[in-house]
Image (cartoon, coloured by chain):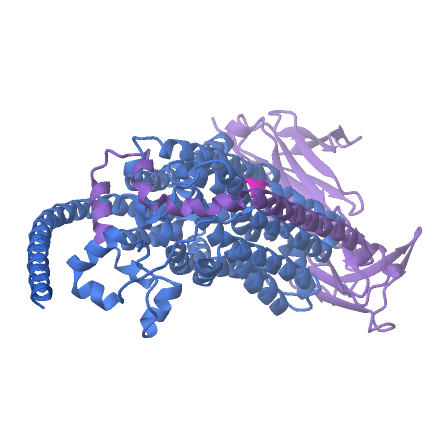
Amino acid sequence: MPPAVTDLEYTPPDGGWGWVVVFASFISIGFAFSFPKSLTIYFKEIQEHFGISYSEIAWVSSIMMATTYAGGPVSSVLVNRYGSRPVVMIGGLMVGAAMITSSFANSVMHLFICVGVIGGFGLAFNLQPSLTITAKYFSSKRPIANGLAMAGSPVLLSVLAPLNQFLFDNFGWRGSFLILGGVLLHCCVAGSLMRPIKIKPSVKKPTPPSVTEVNPTHQSVTEVDVNNPTAETVNGKGCVEKVNRFIDLSIFKHRGLLIYLVGNIVMLFGVFAPIVFLVPYAEQHGIDEHDAALLLSVLALADTVACTGTGFIASTGWIRPNIQYFYSFAVSCCGVCLLTGSLLTGYVGLVVYTVMFGLTYGIVSALKFEVLMDLVGPHKFSSTVGLVTVIECIPVLLGPPIFGLLVDIFEDYKCIHFTSGGMMLTSGVFLFIMNYYNYRQLENKEKGSRRELQINSADKIAAREEANDKEAAVNMRSEDVTYSA
Amino acid sequence: MAYIIHCILLLLYCDTIHSEATSSPESNPVITIRKALSRGESHVKVVEESAVLSLQTIELLCNLTDIPNNPPSVTGYWTKDGQEIENSKETVNRNDDQYIFKRTIPVTDVGNYSCVFRENDAQVTFVLDVPVMKDKRDKPIVTYIGDTVVLKCNLKHIPKTWNWYKANNTEKDLINVTASPLKYKIMIHKNVTKLSVLNLTEADAGMYICSGEFDIRAIESQLELRVLSFLEPLKPFLVIVVEVIVLVTLILLCEKCKKRPDHDTATTENDVYTEQTSKLTHSDSNGMETATRQRKLEQ
């Protein structure tokens, strides 16, 4: 679907304060994606303290990530109602408070609820609004803005990892959680930078929606004259309409979006496992702990470079209209890289593989939300992203444990690479083919509707002329009557 | 012509002083390890590792076979940690095409022993070692007053007993769980031991020593415990919170200041609706866009 930028009732600034908003999104998105991963440093100590197994404590991270994705619809509803800024600030307060209370935890359940659920929701309130507001501030430079904002994830991970180590050595896990609560309050700072765009869409609906469906030609005439931008806000009659007022469920009829969803679900099953198991995979090849940890830094660096670079590439005139194809190409490349990377051996081979994987992964993550914005347009993006992330939380949650099970069964990390590589390649190819099919269908529909429009406008003109003639005739008759009276 | 050297290590019981009632079935007294050395590896050191766990007299046995020409005797000597042991040079007589070279080692004298044969420079090294502590923790464990801490020690082999001590200057005080059950809990499970210290106070800070007792000697590991009051992390936390509040206030104030002169011009941006079509600078040549606009209008 070509970018429906025409949904906006104003010109996006494409610069100016927009770059400050990108920086704020950089911080919010960075925390949202990297914070759950960076907590793993504390797990060994907490595991000893509460006398539980590693897999139990690892649920804290999983719950946090899953809730970040699952809280999408709630976040979208609030953003639609109140705008991005208050939601991000409340999210920052929530996650900060969650970490502060969890530093006093006396049981693992306390940690699950505080860090996992409340913290996760707080991060969800950071993630979706940041993406939404980036879409509102940019249109032609939107891929650059998205790329820069998504680069927050690897950059903040590289910052949080040594910071967490330092805090842990000096303050133990309780003190660290307290201080991390303070660090996460910087999301509130990011939120305060997200100045709302001053223009609010004026929601004047002259006729109820039932009339729109019955009388399309008449409605289209009035829509040209009257400001009626939103198709989503309705006159609240009935349950479905009430829900639709907060969140637009009609997007599920959008074919391009369904294709995107299916492709993404398959991709997300496979994409996290290679990162999660990178260090154990390296250690299995006889590489020591410090060098293996260095691999993660290499991955983060490659990710950052790719994210920013992709933004610039995707905004060029050649790529932008075909961004769906570019995305499917990137996903396929990531899959191929995973499949072939497992064949490389030795430390140098592993570094090469990590760099390649980091680059392709960076491209995919930079484009992930840009492609969604491209599909549905910035106006509907806010509702859409919430619904998309709640569906995506299933592969995010189930992916790593399933792969862990595979490793336990086959006792070789190569199987992870083959499985996830295969999944990503399938997903990429699927997206490519289905997008091509979708574009063809849309083109045919366009041609059909253009013809219809021409016929309709010819009819309208004829009808209007008839009406005018009739009116003139009526007026002349009434004048005659008055005269005669 | 290939000559292959077989080396056999035998660990023998000499006398068992302790009844070994507390030992687990794994400490089987008789261990036989065979090592074959092929011709290609004759100049390569073959290493055999073995951990000494209990009071035993160890007999090291090197068995040389398939020497060409089958001489009636060969000479060899022993080295310890690279240095030749005095008076260890021996002439080994042939015994059914084998040359067996033995040495008895006292159990207190562990190290790297090698038997070397002059004729073909073949060498086998036996690395006799005492068990070492696994997962040693270099950095201190940080906890807080009133909190509980679990200190863990882990060995590769299973000791006879585990003991925990608290270091008191240069001395060690044994931690007695029965004397203070509300304070300490010790858990022992084969090669892992855990000490839980409850209701921490500042006096509990210091060095804790876990000791795994074997017959030959006890293996120790030190863990440092630091007990902080909650005010310590509170200070940087408060600094960060103040910084966040200051930043947020500044940003919002700046915005309000900027808003006031712009207030009159804000409403004019609402009229931009109709100008949206002219502002697209990207991919305007994509013919599908005009169709999209028309489709949007029709909805």
Tell me the residue at 27%/46% (across/down): A431
Q: Is residue A347 above or below residue A104?
A: above
* Residue bounds of the magenta highlight: A153-158
Figure label count: 0
- Horizontal placement of B91 versus A337: left or right? right
* Residue A369 position within the rendered picture, expressed as x and y whole percent measured from the top left: 39, 47
Image quadrant assignment for residue B149: bottom right
What is the display colour for chain B?
purple
The answer to whether residue A110 is visible is yes
* Residue B97 position within the rendered picture, expressed as x and y whole percent measured from the top left: 55, 36
Residue A85 within the magenta-colored segment of the rendering:
no
Q: Please name whichever residue, A288 or A77, is drawn nearer the observer in this view of the structure.
A: A77
Q: Please name whichever residue, A145 or A43, is drawn nearer the observer in this view of the structure.
A: A145
- Horizontal placement of B14 versus A92: left or right? right
- Horizontal placement of A449 versus A6: left or right? left
The answer to whether residue A38 is visible is no
Q: Please name whichever residue, B162 or A7, is drawn nearer the observer in this view of the structure.
A: A7
* Residue A380 position within the rendered picture, expressed as x and y whole percent measured from the top left: 35, 54
Q: Is residue A67 above or below residue A196?
A: below
The C terminus of chain B lies in which quarter of the figure? Answer: bottom left
* Chain appearing in blue on the rendered image: A
Q: Please name whichever residue, B20 or B193, is drawn nearer the observer in this view of the structure.
A: B193
Q: Main secondary structure of the magenta part?
A: helix
Tell me the residue at 10%/50% (across/down): A461
